[in-house]
Image: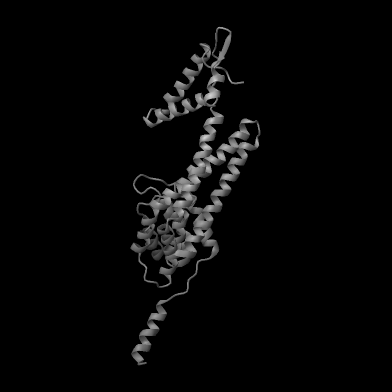
Amino acid sequence: MSETQKTNKDVVQNDKKNINLKKSDLVKHWLLGYSSETAYNYERLQALGTTNAMVPIVRRLYKTKEEQAKELKKYMIFFNTEPSYIGTVIHGIAASMEEQRANGEQIDSDDINSVRTGLMGPMAGIGDTVSQGIVYPILAGICCSLALAGNVLGPILFEVVYKAIMLTMGYSFYMLGYRQGKNSILKLLQSGRLNKVTEIFSIIGLMVVGNMAATRVNVLTPIEFTVGKVRFNLQEVLDSLLPGMIPLATTLLILKLVGKKVNPTYIIALIFVVGILGSLLGILAPIE
């Protein structure tokens, strides 16, 4: 090997640094990510909060104020995803790419933002489904049943368990993103496994919501009439044909009104008016 080749090799090796993020840096980044919506604005949405969350990472990887400011500026672009459950994987990937970039890997600002922008849509869809379509309705259904039964643990259990699930999933996906990097997440998305899992849990969530409509929407009718010597109780007849028919019809009617973009305040007022008039006219029965 010639002296020139040796010199060039030494230069390449000297470009490689050995700066490692500490576990505390990663935990701070993950926790600060939960405040990404507290600095929400309609121009960049979560960008300001996400940039603030990157401060512990950038401070560890870059020493001068000028370098830190330059690296933080690239995060001040439009960004929006599910911030609590699944979306944290994006922040973990960004931290991993930043660490590689600071250590001399050929990764530029556009590479990092391209990955973040490409993943924010899929992660938002999956994360919102998990949080709003699965965890929230299932847990709310269980805890509301406890609260309606007079158990004070209902609301307490909801708050504690909901936060525990959120933090556990958020931390796990953040660390998954940091350890595996962008390639593993892209392969997982392409395989369709996440979509299958999401679909399964969505079905479970819909079952829970359907059960709540049948058991928590109590609408009864006291109407009775006699034909000859035979007494007919309308509620008993309806229950023999389809138990919960009136609650189901009520739920579907409200769903129809919501689908037509009727103001929720008007819907609530309509429920009060119909309930009061129905009770006064003897059409609806009070719930005991």
Q: Residue at x 51, y 42 (%)?
A: 205
Residue that lies at the very extreme toward the bottom in this rendered image: 2
Please indicate whether residue 7 sits to the left or right of residue 250 in the image: left
Q: Is residue 47 visible?
A: no
Task: Report the quarter where the C terminus lies.
Answer: top right
Residue 279, percent from left and from top: 53, 14
Please indicate whether residue 234 sits to the left or right of residue 120 in the image: right
Q: Is residue 249 above or below residue 153?
A: above
Residue that lies at the very extreme toward the top in this rendered image: 228
Q: Residue at x 47, y 18 (%)?
A: 274
Out of 171 and 195, give the one closest to the viewer: 195
Q: Is residue 211 visible?
A: yes
Residue 29, percent from left and from top: 49, 57
Out of 189 and 235, give the one closest to the viewer: 235
Q: Tag count in the figure? A: 0
Q: Is residue 219 above or below residue 108?
A: above
Q: Is residue 52 above or below residue 18?
A: above
Q: Residue at x 52, y 24 (%)?
A: 241
Residue 68 quadrant: bottom left
